[in-house]
Every structure is written in structure tokens, then in C-alpha cells.
Image (cartoon, rainbow, N blue to C red):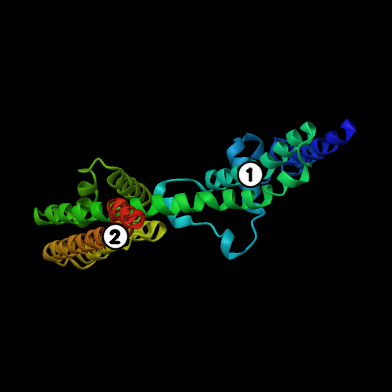
Amino acid sequence: MWQLALIPGVIAGLGVALVLSQLLPKQPQLAAAITRLGNTAAVDAKTDASFEVRVGSWVRARLPDLPGFTLPTRNLALVGVSVNKYLSDKALLAAFGLIAPSLFGLFLQVLGVVPFYLPALLGIPLGVALWFGPDQDLKAKAATAREEFSRAVAVYLELVAAERRRGAPAGHALLSAAQVGRSWVFVRIRQELTRAQYAGTPPWDALTTFSEEIGVPELADVAKIVRLSGEEGASVYETLRARGKSLRVQLLNNEHTHANEASERMTIPMTMLAMVFVGIILTPLVMNLLIA
């Protein structure tokens, strides 16, 4: 009868081997290589890609077009995580949640405690939960990063206004103001402006595109205001100062809202704690009355 315990293990081993065979590098086919001679099209070098890239590419090619499987590209671009790493982490976590209960069930079946399939059934909901687990973590990180980005943009507005006040050109004002800060927000803005400078793209267009990619509309406001100065020669010093002030007020109101929400969340625990203290005080009195 002990041979029956090996059957689930063999099935699980074959499944793991099949998955790994799709992810590991394959030998190049000479016929396909000869066919591509003289072809100027780019070739997908999967054999040179890392394990993370191979897993992410494999999962991305097989994602269904459903609401639960859409890629949060804005959040990924904001926190600086590649799509391949995001999908690779999700796939590995889901695979762990799917396989771990099966392996534990094999161990319990060998010991004669429970059949293999009972713990293995838990792998399906556990794998689904672990698949969607990184989404909540990414959403929380993106929300924190977006708030920090908005606060940095408020400072960036003042710096750009100061550069324009002293007579700097519109494009130079954007880049000079970005070079002042040392936080990750200013580094990202500086990278986009430097890339636009080498590509010959107007800096305000680069900031507008970047703001749409990461979902921070406050940065697009800076680009729109400076575009008026660069293309039409308008004086935008007061406009930049006014937008910076309104942004600071908006951020302050958001902080007040978060503080009020935190206070409301603390109401229930404090009420329960007060009820516990009241119960501790009243219990001896009630018991004395009942005994008497």
C-alpha cells in the first residue's frame, strides 16, 4: 500500500518539471537562425534573459483579458517596478500557494493521517489569494509614493517660479529647479528632463507624458504653466506661485482628512476599552449584590 503514496508525488513532480521546461532556456534552432540571416527585425533574446524576465514574459503572454488581470502600469511606473518583476512575483507566490499544500498532504498521507487530496484542495484558494496579494501591497506603496510626489511638486513649483523670476529660460528653469532636490521625486523628474533634452523633445511635453504615465496630474500643471512661458512668452511667475499655494492647501486638507479618518477609526477601540474598564469596576459590585 505504501506504493500508492508515491503516485501523488510523481504527478506533482511531473507538473513542476513541465512548468520548468517552459521557463528554462532552450537550445537555439539552426534552421530558424539561418532564416533570420539578413533580417533587420529585432529578435527576442529569451535565452539571454534572466529567470525573472522569462517568468514575467511567459505569464504576460498568457494573461486573460479580464478585469482582475489588468496590469497596473501607472502604479508600477510610479514605484519603479518592472512589469516582468511584478508578474514574476505574483506567479511564484501563486505557485507556492498551489504546491505547498500538496506537498504537505503528501507528507500527511505517508504518515497515514489524512488522504493527499484533502490538504491539496486548500492550494486552490491559497494560490488565488497569493496571486492577488501583491496588488494590495503595490496599491498601498503607490498611494504613499503619489502623496510624496505631490508634496515634492509643490516645492518644485516654487523652485521653477524662482528660476523664472531671475530670468532663466522656460526649459532651463525646469531642469535647474529639478537639480536642486536630492529626493527620488526630483531624481525622476531630472531623468525625464535629461532624456527629453537628448531626444530634442520640449521639456513641458516630457513632463506631461510622464505625469500621465505615473498618474500625478499636479506635475502636468507645472508643464502647462511653463508651456505658456516657453511658447507664448507669457509671465508665469505669479501663476506658478498661486498654483503652488493652492496645491499646498489641497495637501493640507488631505492631511486633515486622513487625520480625521484615523481618529474615527480609533473611536471603536477606545469605546471597547472603556467598556472593559467599566466591566472590571462593576463586576465585583454586582457579584457582591448577588451573593448578599
In the image, farthest residue toward the front: 292
Q: Residue at x 15, y 62 (%)?
A: 245
Q: Residue drawn 45% across and 50% down?
A: 138
Residue 40 visible in the displayed image: no
Closest to the camera, between mark 1 and mark 2, is 2
Measured as percent of width and height from the top left, residue 116 is found at 78, 41
Instruction: Indicate whether 12 appears above or below 254.
Output: above
The CA span between labels 1 and 2 is 37 Å
Q: Residue 267: give its label.
A: 2
Q: In the visual, does 158 lie left or right of 208?
A: left
Residue type, label 2: Thr
Question: The disc labelled 1 sits on which kind of residue?
Answer: Gly
> Mark 2: which secondary structure?
helix
Q: Residue at x 27, y 46 (%)?
A: 186
**Nearer to the camera, 154 or 140:** 140
Pick the quarter of the image with the N terminus: top right
Q: Which residue is mark 1?
A: 97
Residue 207: mark in rendering: none
Circle 1 — which element?
A: helix
Residue in the picture at 77% in, 46% down: 117
Towards the viewer: 216 or 96: 96
Q: Is residue 188 above or below residue 268?
A: above
Instruction: Check the image and name the residue furthest to the left.
Output: 166
Q: Is residue 114 left or right of residue 180?
A: right
> How many residues crowd mark 2 within 10 Å: few (<14), some (14–19), many (20+)?
few
Percent x, y for residue 215? 38, 60
